[in-house]
Amino acid sequence: MIDNILSIILITVLISIVLNVLLKKIQIPTVIGYIFAGTIITHLFELHDAKHSQALHILAEFGIVFLMFMIGLEFSIKHLKAMKREVFLFGVLEVLIVGNFFGAFAHEILKVELKSAIIIGFALALSSTAIVLKMLTEKNEIHSGFGRVVVGVLLFQDIAVIPILLMISIFSNQDQSIATMLLWTAIDAIGLLIILYLIGQYLLEPFLEWTLSAESEEIFLISALIIVVGFAYLAHLFGFSFSLGAFLAGMTLSETKFKYRIESDLLTFRDILLGVFFVSIGMSIELQTLINSWWIILLLVFGVMITKAIIIFFSLLPFTQKRTALKSALSLMQIGEFALAIFALATQNSILDPKLSQILIITTVLSMIITPFIIINLKKIADKIYDNTSHIEPPEITSDGYKNHIILIGFGPLGQKLSTELEKLHVPYIILEHDYKLLQKARKEDKPVILAKATDINTLKSFGVESALAVIVAIQNPATTRIIVDALTSINKETNIVVAVKNPSQKEILKSFNSPNLSMVDTLELLSKEILKRVLKCDIKKAKNV
């Protein structure tokens, strides 16, 4: 049995790798490769019974848990204030109008039972955070005018998942009236929020500081995992979903100094477990349903996507330029990965008919497959419909407000000297430091320092690498320096990078990055000059005393 499971896992991983390498060549994201891998492996090994896939589905659920945690980390009060219009106006309009339209259509025209129609309607209103944000980031349009609108709507959609999952729990409970259910749900929610608030206010930061005092990467990583899983399990004990608890854990940590370090540490876990989630979705696809109902599925795919794009376009039109509204609508017209989880959960709770659920899952997957091709050609589509010369794009917004600044990586001896010089020159700068003791030292000196891993691309983007005047890498570890330079050049080869190097061999390795704006400073050479300078000063003093 164990050998059989191991062979299935190995073959699944191999198929996923091969598919994703091939699909990436035609700009299809890894999400689709994982789904295809799940479908192939299911029919290859005939894995249709629960005993073969139960463990995989448990792991898959934690993919959503970690995704919701990461979303919670971004859901800070500061972030909301900066994007309140996009989140609470555009996002609310999209979810309510699209959700109610599809729900009403399913109930009134297709004669779907009311509870099922409500779940279907709001699930179809969701778009793919994973695909859209990944594509916009790769195209460097995440902070453009329409990119800001898209991010705001996606953020509200991610929040809207919570009440949709709550609706499934309410609809599936047949023992109590809806009024009683809502009352007890409110009581449980208040109790959960009070407990999580107290934990976040008084226990989390001291606990994480204590684990960092051990100066062990694995201990801090395990501690972060315990927080995510612990919050998720606590929410589950109160009758809510694991993902709600993880989302609240992320929100609790979003205002702390540990945010960026935890985010970079857990990113790999999130991506791996999300891959498992999409494999499990692929395992749930029945090819027979696709063969038997292909015409219904195609009608649904194009009907939902076109209708959704039209609704989003006209709901945004009173508030934005036509071109921005069009590009936003085209970016959000697909059905998202959370809809897959909602359909699966609704089916498990007997709210959705299994056959209808299958049709909806396949429809969702096909809409996600189409999406990358649309986003790649957004500009061409917009140019054909609207005259490009008459359009003025709204100003680009940089992440977290960082612009025309210096990013100083490392607060060791060299970093400390550089920060002092930058302050003398009145140059705005921010320090990224991974070592907690050095962070504490910088904070005592009132330096603008953040606890973060500079090896993580998303972290670097968060602090405005693309709009920075320069990035100074002032750390002593050659291996880490190479990773950081690789991350910086992958974001933008035009970034001005200054690196402190220790020896000629390190220089040669860094030269291989072929970055036109990479400068290297030999720390040994600087040190020898400083020693000579001080020796000469001593000689001068002696000469004066003679």
Image (cartoon, rainbow, N blue to C red):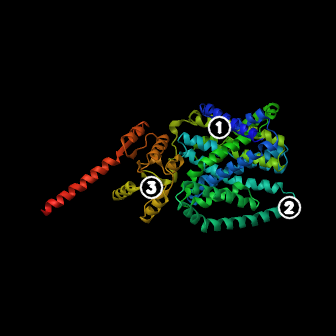
Residue carrying label 2: 177
Q: Could you say whether the residue bearing mark 3 is in a helix, strand or loop?
A: strand
Report the residue at 38% width, 56% height from top.
Answer: 413
The answer to whether residue 303 is visible is no
Q: Quadrant of residue 76?
A: bottom right
Give the position of the N terminus as an image quadrant: top right
Q: Residues within 10 Å of mark 1 (few under 14, many from 20)?
A: many
Q: Nearer the viewer, residue 383 or 187?
A: 187
Front residue (pair 135, 8): 8
Q: Quadrant of the C terminus?
A: bottom left
Q: Residue furthest left?
A: 546
Amino acid at the residue labelled 2: Ser
Contact? badges 1 and 3 (CB < 8 Å): no
User: In which quadrant of the rendered view does residue 203 lie?
Assistant: bottom right
Q: CA distance from mark 1 to mark 2?
A: 41 Å
Mark 3, residue position: 431
Instruction: Report x, y in % for residue 515.
Output: 42, 38
Q: Amino acid at mark 3?
A: Ile
> Given the image, on which type of amino acid does mark 1 rest?
Thr
State the residue at coordinates (80%, 31%).
Answer: 291
Q: Give the residue at x 71% y 61%.
A: 234
Residue 23 x, y percent position in the rendering: 63, 32
Helix, strand or loop at mark 2: loop
Measure the alpha-carbon separation of dots 1 and 3: 38 Å
Q: Where's residue 526, x and y in %?
A: 31, 49
Q: Earlier in the sequence, mark 3 or mark 2?
A: 2
Q: Quadrant of residue 202?
A: bottom right
Disc ID at residue 371? 1
| Foreground pick, 147 / 187 | 187
